[in-house]
Amino acid sequence: MTHPILPPDRIFSIPAGVPFLDALARRLLIETHDDPLALGRYRVLLPTRRACRALQETFLRLREGRPLLLPQLTPLGDIDEEELALAAEAEEPGAALDLPPALPSLMRQLMLARLVSRAAAARSESMSADRAASLAGELARLVDQVATERLSFERLAEIVPGELARHWQLTVEFLEIVTRFWPKIEKQAGAVGAAERRNLLLERQAELWLKSPPQDPVIAAGSTGSIPATADLIAAVAQLPQGRVVLPGLAAGGNAEFWQKVEADPSHPQHGLRLLLQRLDVAPTSVLPWPDAPAHPAVARRQAFLTEALAPADLTHLWSRPNRDAAADRIALKGEGHEISLTRLDCPGLSEEALTIALLMRDAIEKKGQRAALVTPDRSLARRVASELKRWSIEIDDSAGTDLGQTPPGSFLRLVAGLPLDGVAPVPLLSLLKHPLAAGGEATAGFRAKLRALERAALRGPRPAPGFAGLQAALAPAIERYPELAILSSWLDRIADAAAPYLDLADSKRVPLEELIRAHLTVAEALVASDSETGASRLWRGDAGEAAASFFTEFLAASKEHEPIAAPEYPALLDALMAAQRVRPRYGRHPRLFVWGPLEARLQQVDLMILGGLNEGTWPVTPSPDPWMSRPMREAFGLPPAERRIGLSAHDFQQACGAARVVLTRARKVDGAPSVPSRWLTRIDALMKAAGQDPALLQAPQWLAWAAAWDRPEGPPQPIARPSPRPPVEVRPHQLSVTEIETWKRDPYAIYARHILRLRPMEPIDAAAEAAERGTIIHRALDAFIRAYPDRLPANAHDALMRFGREAFGGWLDRPAVWAFWWPRFERIAGWFLEQRAEELPAILQSLTELRGKIEIDAGGFAFTLTAKADRIDRLRDGSTAIIDYKTGALPSAKMVKQGYAPQLPLEAAMAALGGFPDLGQTVVTRLDYWRLSGGDPPGHIEGAGGRDADAVALAEDALAGLMRLVVTFANEATPYDSEPHPAYAPHYSDYGHLARIAEWSAAGGEE
């Protein structure tokens, strides 16, 4: 194709170091002699809507608020259809624009998902709805790329399957199936893809302008022409009578070799502009500088430096050439890059990077009129910076937007969708009902109060049985104990009724998608409704609510033709479709601070530009693997290489470095793993070293020091002391059980928290099968069996013990974790227990279980009661007594028993010797045994307390004497309830360790 020779004054460039929109607006005002009406004749084409808004603001700022008629500002790719239709009518009366509409993106994705599913089914492959939707999203991007590059899927035949790996051959065959039917589907729908329609609009606009050139000025500014149809429109603008093209940041002074290397290097920042100039048939040396656009000297030096640093790889050997005239040599850096106003900050981690950036932005607005922006593709870093700025009550929005699924309406709708997946399990149910939007048709405060009560009564501990029926069953024991909780049962029924439309479909294997969506939204609105507002008014309000409403409106419209899906696949399908939706704020919250993505930052200018997240893989972004085409396949098909996107990112990077002051930041570690600096930072370092400069001169360590000091307390660390409360004697406990005596010795603070502060631990939500609960249930089963058969074994002993076991477990067997883990262990314990019972019965006169007892102790006027409930006491035929303690956990060592740190059995023996068990009488205990009941391999074993040769009588006497000393000690008000006074004997777990802040004072070297 031949191109006309353009006049010499049609193609211009504004250097990267010059504020692009300021230079453009200032020149147009000069041309119109500041006439407020003359600008109305101009038309300016810009890359994005944001650039159009920014140019409007620039005109108003340069005019200092005085009124003027703005030029017609048009985003490239968003051509005014009405104007095109009028122009077509004027050119050929009766002619219509006759362009097919664009398929809505969500509808197209679901249509492609159906096609993908059918293609998979034709190959006897199963594919879930969410997987098909994800592949359809990637396929839609491929279709758009093909349309953008003006290619055709007919070129698939040029990809030789025999040269590809087997899985790629299958992919090519799959693509052929899809692309054979997709054009027919588009034709039946009477619509085309958004990229194809954009091409048609741009082509029609170029065609009309060339046929009937407008006589008023038309300026295409700021575009690199990366889209072929856009490049053609720019070429058409350049041929208009008053058409001009203004390029962003074309490198000046490059020789022929430089531009040849740029053309061959898609990752170079000038590659896109070079291709555009080729399309315009203009040599780079023919491009004129935009009038009245001088660059600041420091910024000009910085841009020359960056141009050399980002030179094509084949030219970097010139960095070390002797006697060369290089930008890096001409810069005399004096620390923190003052000569070129460039600073680099390598932060320890993401948190430190975010705080450092926030400090830089906070400092910038201290200077009158200064504006600052963070530019980063890392949305996590953007959120962190916005959060850090709230330290100073500064609200700032991320203009790149927020994932719809992360907004309040989006997260609530996702929680509703996922509720049935685990049978209304406690964690997803609480996540849903504790969401700020949840109200259940009543006042929010009352709703929260009932939910907290339900959580305490039924949702803590092992998971209830599935569904709301399981929750009611878990709630029933609490209502029996506390009748005032009966209101929770009816409240839970109302929640179940509200959720029923969606939950009733939860197990269906084939449900119309539209029916699932409507049921989902019905439940969501019912749960969001309050006593004063409808669910719709609360759920769909605000920017995020409106975005969610638009998404579901399109989702419903697209679902009508979709085949039924399995209901359990709906939550994942919703996540897959919602992933591409973003909510962008309509207005920024702070007038002088901004957070931009690289796309949003194009052509923007501020006083301080912070380029954050400069790690390889983050900026530039590593291209994600294409599930449809490998790199060789894309090359054979004619699609541009992935490096082209890196080249566009490099151009964005260099353009963003055109501010008066620039700071480059990165985190040395991300998620605990070392990171690699961005290739652009590496090139800057390499160029400086080649020029004999130290890259450390760009660093500004004071900012990192200030950030590190921000959260550091003044003065040296002040370690806290071990808690040592000394409550008055009258509030100290006068009664403890034998098991609590062990706690008293090992961790007095736990006794203080439980008996003096009266604090009780709460069970975890959806707790695992804990040993304490299992032990209680197993004790109950064995107790019932021994009571029924105290001196014999029945003929059907195993069946009887299993029956008692089922009764002891009761409703716990409805809980999946209990049935799966606890019950099999109990079955093994039962077999082992009956074997031991059969062996010992000849020596036993009677077995007593769960025997309660107590003794009174007078410790120097301090009355103290020791209580006990022995698991089992056997009267032996030789007149002696044995005390047995069932343990489902670890056994105390013989050393612990002898030293008094495991005194339970010896104290029970002492109580028996003093007649502390009324049903037993005064007796001498000659045997103290632990029965370890694990249910593992072996299921159990027996171990004597204090060791095999320990004397039970001596152990009992020592334990009682030790208790007397302990009581006397704590009867003194000066005795503190220390936390773990003897770390070697500290309990393995304490419910109150976090309150005692053990990790803090023990790590700080607290006293032993």
Image (cartoon, helix red, strand yellow):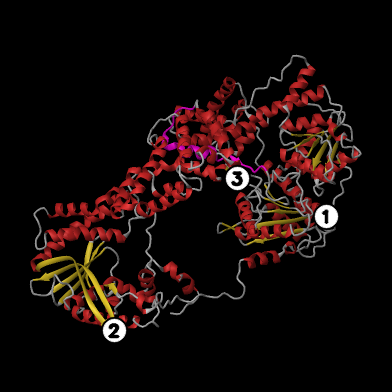
**Horizontally, is 993 left or right of 344 in the view?**
left
Q: In the picture, residue 121 is in which quadrant?
A: top left
Residue 671 lies in quadrant: bottom right
Whichever of labels 3 and 1 marks the residue nearer the N terminus, that label is 1
The residue under label 3 is which amino acid type? Thr
Q: Which residue is drawn at 48% across and 74% down?
A: 1001
Q: Nearer the viewer's eye, disc 3 or disc 1?
A: 3
> Residue at (65%, 34%) from the top-left corner?
639
Residue furthest front in the image = 532
Q: Nearer the viewer, residue 629 or 373?
A: 373
Q: Where is residue 266 in the image (x, y as percent from the top left)?
A: 71, 42
Q: Is mark 2 on a helix, strand or loop?
A: loop
Q: What residue type is labelled 2?
A: Gly
**Residue 948 image point, x, y percent:** 21, 75
In the image, residue 346 sits, relative to residue 464, either above or below, namely below
Give the magenta part as a residue range: 562-586
Q: Name the residue under label 1.
A: 301
Q: Would residue 737 be seen by someone viewing this image from the given angle? A: yes
Separation of marks 2 and 3 at Cα, in angstroms:
69 Å
**Callout 2 touching callout 1 (CB < 8 Å):** no
Type of amino acid under label 1: Arg
**Who is closer to the viewer here, 789 or 277?**
789
Query: Label 3, on which residue?
Result: 402
Q: Distance between the residues labelled 3 and 1?
A: 37 Å
Q: Residue 861 carries which label?
A: 2
Give left or right: position of 83 versus 215. Answer: left
**The C terminus sits in image quarter:** bottom left
Q: Closer to us: mark 2 or mark 3?
A: 2
Describe the element under mark 3 as helix, strand or loop: strand
Front of the two marks 2 and 1: 2
